[in-house]
């Protein structure tokens, strides 16, 4: 099992206007999937712009353990020689995913659809996260949970199906990870595997399946949902992938530039897939001065440059149906809401309770520690924005959650007194260049390890 490194407290202080032009790291969702589809295809997949955070590197190690030849060619440049859908080997050691929820859950789908057995493990945070929602459909497809910790948690040993069954599965929760695990298991099944979503979730798996040669159809289902059908047992063909900049990572300098007076920055090549733009839509409703420039396509995804200027924000009501398009961005949206004038209500956030931490509780506590009023009503978070934040409270408890750590370090850039977090070490799991990138824009951020 991964052990978490020693805590590295971090702090941020009020900064002058941010300026500069930067490209944030590659999208984490696409980085995980690039490696996994490289593993499952025949031939050589070349990846450019791969996010080299610890989560993605854990997925690379798992692909290697399952039989792929995975090689780093240079910064962000990787080559994967795959073994095909039917060529996976049983790993000799447990697959250690560290903190990588996406990598572990998607790889469960891969293993479930193959006649192999693998043990999944991770750090204390990943061990605490629920896996039953993934395991339920995979068991319907013929996979067997040989052993697991209480509640279907890691460490967990999964035996894949000798003859996977195609199923029709309606996910009870909007989750791209559940959908993707079922589709990945369905690659090994004869016939058509169908996933029904009541609310559309990010569609990178469907797009990339097509890009690697699988037959996938998508149709609307109700007002917000979709039906995805995958023809099983394709021969996936290796391809070249260019990973666009991660909108979830771009969210941090984006909000920083909005709340720090006098800022103007440009964020290059940010993915604007319609199922990932909930934060942009919400911030625009709040009055954010954000211009989308140089709109283009890169690696099968829509991308653009975001020009962001300091703005006076106002509180808004964020509808629950928007949650799947911005599920990772609510902590940083709560920070923006704290600097807005008026109340912001974020609806339908039950999914935040089962992320790297209970993000709903962690955000609420972090806001309170820095003098911001907020409350939780059911699955809603309501932030009472006053246009200013005092800061200067006790260190925010991050609960090993990288997005909590980064969000509150951004808060400190515009707060009246410094904001501290109890640990910034885990930021490396998703955004290893966060601190130097922000400092390059003029942000006053200090990580203990970089003193």
Image (tube, rainbow, N blue to C red):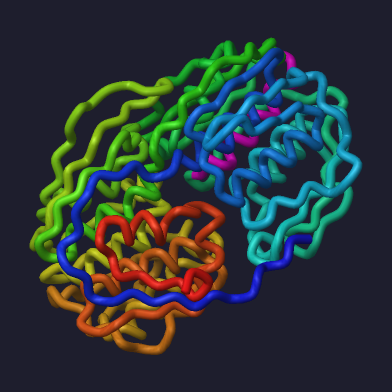
Q: Quadrant of the N terminus?
A: bottom right
User: Is residue 78 on the magenta stretch?
Assistant: no
Image coords of residue 230 (percent x, y): 59, 18
Q: In which quarter of the image is residue 361?
A: bottom left
Residue placed furthest toward the right: 92
The residues colored magenta run 175-191
- Residue plotted at (48% across, 69% down): 450
Picture residue at 58% right of the left edge, 76% below the top: 7
Which of the pair 130/302 is nearer the observer?
A: 302
Could you say where residue 58 lies in the image, as x and y percent from the top left?
68, 46
Against 230, is 294 above or below? below
- Give the percent coordinates (x, y) of residue 118: 84, 42
The chief SS type of the magenta part is helix
Vertical order, 371 against 165 (above or below)? below
Residue 339, quarter of picture: bottom left
Q: What residue sits 54% from the left and 45% below the top?
A: 172
Which residue of the protein is positioned furthest toward the front in this rendering? 451
């Amino acid at each position: 099992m991964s052990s978490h490194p020693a805590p590295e407290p971090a702090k941020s202080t009020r900064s002058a206007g941010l300026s500069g032009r930067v490209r944030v790291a590659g999208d984490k969702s696409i980085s995980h999937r690039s490696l996994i589809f490289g593993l499952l295809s025949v031939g050589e997949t070349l990846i450019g712009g791969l996010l080299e955070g610890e989560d993605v590197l854990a997925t690379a190690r798992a692909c290697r353990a399952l039989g792929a030849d995975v090689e780093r060619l240079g910064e962000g440049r990787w080559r994967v020689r795959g073994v095909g859908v039917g060529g996976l080997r049983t790993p000799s050691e447990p697959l250690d995913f560290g903190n990588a929820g996406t990598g572990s859950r998607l790889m469960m789908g891969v293993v479930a659809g193959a006649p192999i057995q693998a043990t999944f493990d991770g750090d204390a945070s990943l061990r605490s996260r629920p896996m039953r929602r993934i395991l339920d459909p995979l068991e319907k497809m013929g996979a067997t949970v040989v052993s697991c910790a209480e509640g279907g948690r890691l460490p967990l040993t999964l035996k894949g199906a000798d003859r996977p069954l195609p199923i029709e599965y309606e996910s009870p929760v909007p989750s791209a990870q559940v959908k993707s695990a079922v589709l990945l298991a369905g690659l090994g099944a004869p016939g058509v595997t169908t996933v029904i979503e009541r609310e559309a979730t990010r569609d990178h798996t469907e797009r990339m399946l097509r890009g690697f040669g699988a037959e996938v159809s998508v149709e609307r289902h109700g007002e917000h949902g979709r039906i995805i059908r995958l023809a099983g047992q394709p021969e996936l063909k290796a391809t070249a992938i260019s990973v666009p900049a991660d909108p979830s990572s771009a969210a941090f300098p984006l909000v920083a530039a909005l709340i720090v007076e006098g800022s103007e920055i440009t964020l290059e090549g940010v993915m604007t897939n319609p199922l990932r733009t909930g934060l942009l839509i919400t911030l625009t409703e709040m009055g954010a001065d954000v211009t989308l420039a140089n709109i283009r396509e890169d690696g099968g995804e829509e991308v653009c440059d975001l020009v962001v200027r300091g703005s006076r924000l106002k509180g808004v009501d964020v509808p629950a149906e928007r949650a799947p398009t911005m599920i990772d961005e609510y902590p940083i949206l709560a920070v923006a809401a704290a600097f807005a004038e008026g109340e912001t209500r974020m609806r339908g956030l039950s999914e935040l309770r089962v992320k790297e931490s209970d993000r709903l509780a962690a955000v609420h506590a972090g806001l309170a520690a820095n003098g911001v009023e907020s409350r939780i009503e059911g699955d809603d978070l309501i932030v009472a924005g006053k246009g200013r934040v005092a800061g200067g409270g006790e260190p925010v408890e991050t609960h090993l959650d990288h997005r909590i750590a980064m969000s509150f370090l951004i808060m400190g850039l515009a707060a009246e007194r410094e904001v501290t977090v109890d640990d910034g070490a885990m930021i490396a799991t998703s955004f290893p260049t966060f601190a130097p990138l922000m400092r390059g824009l003029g942000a006053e951020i200090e990580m203990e390890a970089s003193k």
